[in-house]
Image: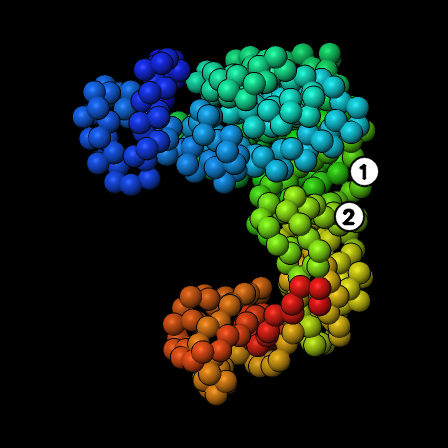
Amino acid sequence: MDLDQLTALRTPEGSAALAAAERVAGGDPLAAAAALRSAGIPGGLAAAALTQAELRRRAAGKFGAAAAGMFLTRAGLEQATRRAVADRRAARLRATGVTTLADLGCGLGADALAAARAGIRVYAVEADPVTAAMAAANAEAAGLADLVTVERGDATAFDATGVDAVFCDPARRRAGTGRRVFDPNAYSPPWDFVTGLAARVPRTVVKVAPGLDHALIPAGAEAEWVSVDGDLVEAALWCGELAEVPRRATLLREKEGPLLNASGSKRGSSYHLTGTGAQEAPVGPVRRFLYDPDPAVVRAHLVAELAADLDATLADPSIAYLYADEARPTPFARCLEITDVLPFSLKRLRALLRERRVGRVEIRKRGSALEPEKLRRDLRLSGDEAAGLALTRVAGDPTVLVCRPVPPGG
């Protein structure tokens, strides 16, 4: 996608091409391209429209119905914040009194739009000209152009002295190749600029990769890990006046129904677990119930805080499985009842499952080198019963736990 193609897509002819592309997208790409050409749509415009239609289909999981009117790039969509996460972040900023925000490296504008929906005036900066133009187009499509100004430029040169807060989502993919960047020093803007923002702007939020090394967290910042429906999606650093606690795990719910084994959860719910991130959970034997913590809890180093809430212990100090004598409803972990504890032996496990007529297993693992799908094949299951398997270590020894789920509410 280049600026000329984007401009073409925003004409009446381009809108017609997009509508035609959306009707045929999702199937055979060659057949879809042929259908557009037979409708008289020029080849270049047809290709651009089909690309947008396919990206919009993928984006629906992040942005919902709004994706149908957005302009997107593959790399931008990959890094863009999910709407539920962006909306919650914007609400938190607004609750602290933020009315003006600089979005440095705004990408396609997902966070800028969320802030504008919360009533915040946004000044967005994006270095890539096509992406900047798309962000502006997305603000216009959302009816938020009066609250979002997009400027093409260098985020490091933006004067943030006139805004209440700064949000920065440094690019973590290499321009041109789309390859992931794992070294924060290779981010754009670079890491030293990102971490230096908090010294200049008292209210700064930085979006970072969930795998961020805790050693890189600036002193005094709140590090938050966010999961949506059990999937870890991002981390953020809340700096300066915005920092409330050292570590936070936030769980968001987009789907209907209970969250993990917590009772009473509804769509749109959010749960927060906080702590220092420096505590260590006690170690003890395997007990009746197994708790598998949400990945946001694990990455935030809050397993010890969860253990205290559940009166639970670890069976191995390096593995984040918790064990307890009773099942307590919690949104922060999946709870399973352990029926059998076996030193790992394929032959013995296969015999046990065959004896119980188990034909379906849900396999989870922590601290095990076994591949679940290979194990599933090797078990040669047959039967009409179901079971859960947890592959782990207990006191350093490879162990398999045979489990059954605990219903919502315990």
Q: Which residue is mark 1?
A: 244
- Tell me the quarter of the image containing the N terminus: top left
Q: On residue 274, which mark appears? A: 2
Identity of the amino acid at label 2?
Thr
Q: Position of residue 159 (x, y in %)?
A: 67, 12
Relative depth, front residue between 179 and 85: 85
Question: What residue sits 54% from the left and 65% below the top?
Answer: 364
Relative depth, front residue between 279 and 140: 140
Question: Mark 2 touching mark 1, by CB under 8 A?
Answer: yes
Q: On residue 128, which mark appears? A: none
Residue 172 is left or right of residue 15, and the answer is right
Residue 205 is left or right of residue 50, and the answer is right
Residue 198 is left or right of residue 109, and the answer is right
Quarter of the image for residue 15 reads: top left
Mark 1 Cα shell of 10 Å, populated few (<14), some (14-19), many (≥20):
some
Q: Position of residue 35 (x, y in %)?
A: 22, 30
Q: Is 166 drawn above or below residue 60 in the view shown?
A: above
Q: Which structural element holds mark 1? A: loop
Q: How is the image coloured?
A: rainbow
Identity of the amino acid at label 1?
Glu
Residue 37 is left or right of residue 14, and the answer is left
Mark 2 Cα shell of 10 Å, populated few (<14), some (14-19), many (≥20):
many
Q: Which structural element holds mark 2? A: strand
Looking at the image, tell me whether mark 2 or mark 1 is earlier in sequence order: 1
